[in-house]
Image (tube, coloured by chain):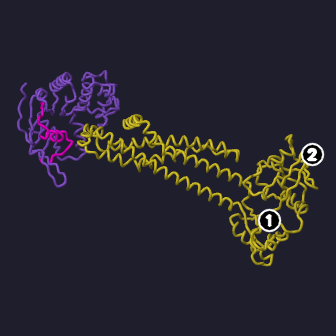
Amino acid sequence: MNDLRAIDLRNIVKVYVNGPMELEVLHGVSLGVDHGEYVAIMGPSGSGKSTLMNLIGCLDRPTRGQYHLDGIDVAQLDDNALAEIRLRKLGFVFQGFNLLGRADALDNVALPLFYAGVPVRERRRRAMAALADMGIADRAKHKPSELSGGQQQRAAIARALINDPAVLLADEPTGNLDSATSEELLQLFSRLNAEGHTILMVTHDQQVADHANRIVRLRDGHIVSDEPSRR
Amino acid sequence: MMYLEEAWRVLLANSVRSILTILGLIIGVGAVIAIQMLGNNMASAVNGMLSGMSDNTFVLFPNQQQQNVRMAGIHLGDLNSVVENVPGIEAAMPVAFLTELVHVGHNTGRYGISADSPVSINGTPILYGRGFTDQDITSNANVTVISNPAYHRLFPNGNNPIGQSIYAGDYRYVIVGVLQAPHSGLLPPLFVHDISIPWTTYVAQYLHGSTIYAARFVVSDPSRMSALEVAVINELRALHGNAAGQEYQSFDKAQITQGINGIFNALTLIVALIGAVSLLVAGIGIMNIMLVSVAERTREIGVRKAIGARSSQILLQFFIEALLLCGSGCAIGMALGLGLGELVNQAFISKLTGSLLPIPWLLALITAGSFAIVVTLAFGTYPAYLASRLDPIEALRYE
């Protein structure tokens, strides 16, 4: 039954070791996210939400505890296996967009397909379709510096979704956008969620979090509340 | 190929930096290839000049530094004794020359007249007529083979001179041959002269007394040259009563070739040293710039890893970037080296020999290619490894 969940964290503990100093950041966090959910994770800085996000994003391994992503036990995989998981199962959207400045939007979106070994024509075709889905097909040949913030974030979302991941992870996705553009982007997220994408978003902005269906609050390495959003 | 495309973009985006980085490789590879070309052409030029010398003769002359030069002097009569007493020596003849005013009609010139034989002359290419025959030698014939420059000076209208006569001092010689090659500047003048006459004729007409300056010996087996040289020297000492301190110097083609090869081996060593030093310096520059590139693009590496790039894929990307950097440097260096080498060869070496070796494309390609691969492997691996080992979380946080 649990294997069917998109994310299944059990008693996750993360300890950072720095010489003789040990710092426990997460004290046994358990969190389950079903396919199709839209979850916002909130918490003040130092609450451990970045650490949690890195663990969920398979950029890091928990010190203790179990983590199943889309049914796969990923808690103690090696670096190459984690890279494969990130490639196939996860899509990242960052606050700073993090597109590659030298490549145009199309090549940026196609990059995960390159690492997945997809042939070049197929890459271009699928990247173009993803850009069209985000409504910026006409910007395909433009470099990130020639795109607006909203367009860059749309390209970044297209890149995150190109491998059809189990979970879309968004870290403060509206942090660098003005309020009108933020609103548009959140509409887009809602649409993607309605289309069946599982979204996990970290934010410190209550208004942004309210777009999600469920809000998880973190404080001092513990989940302090987990409830449906007010919407 | 995505990696190559990416690498090109990176290098072009930092074009000034890229060019400065590979300048060391360009200069190093260019210098090595140019010097290689120059050396090879000089070696071939020298070998061409030596080709006139026959493999089966050597020359002996008394060491001029010794106290008792007179006792060591070789006499005409020694030659027959050596041929009779030393097995393996087929023939012996004096090496002798003098200069004389030579004229044909109103055309005159001062030329060296040398005592020659079929052995000393017939190896060189002939423009007109023939070389000497045994008949010329045994009959003390008044015939001559003249050099190309002498022919042009004495026969300015360019007629075929065979059968015509030249006059030298009191004597008249009938021209039987004209040599093709110009007078060879590298060979000691006692070996090739402009006016060659049979050595027997020379002895009859010019030799006063019986002491000759040097002697030329013909051997039956060139591989025993050194041993025969020693045997002949011993025979000469014996003929002169084993007087104290008699010393002779020998001179053969193998010795000269050996000496010249020594020079070119030294040149090759210098080229290799230049190559090694430029390789090292250029490699350090490339490593430095690759480390800068990795540091600058820390965030990019983090993004690539976050979206699923494996460490090996990051390694490959930076490795290919280094390879492209080195490869383009070596390619430019190769082009410049070939151009420079050919230019210098055309301007200087071709004047010496009249012909050049073909441009050594394959050698240059191998040189440049191996430079590129060695420098990339030695200096590109570490930065690429550093890039591949970056922690994605740290890298993403990098500003």
Name the subunit of mark 1: B
Query: Does dot 1 land on a helix, a strand or a loop?
Result: strand
Give coordinates of residue B4: x percent, y percent: 39, 37
Pointer 2: what residue? B105
Identify whether B133 is placed above or below A9. Answer: below
- Give the image quarter of residue A139: top left
Q: Residue at x 49, y 53 (%)?
A: B276
Name the subunit of mark 2: B
Q: Residue at x 23, y 38 (%)?
A: A86
Picture colour for chain A: purple
Identify whether B81 is placed above or below A219. Answer: below
The residue type indicated by label 1 comes to: Ala
Image chain in yellow: B
Q: Earlier in the sequence, mark 1 or mark 2?
A: 2
Pointer 1: what residue? B214
> What whole-number distance in Å separates the C-alpha atoms at marks 1 and 2?
34 Å
Query: Does dot 2 land on a helix, a strand or a loop?
Result: loop
**Residue B104 falls within the magenta-colored stretch:** no
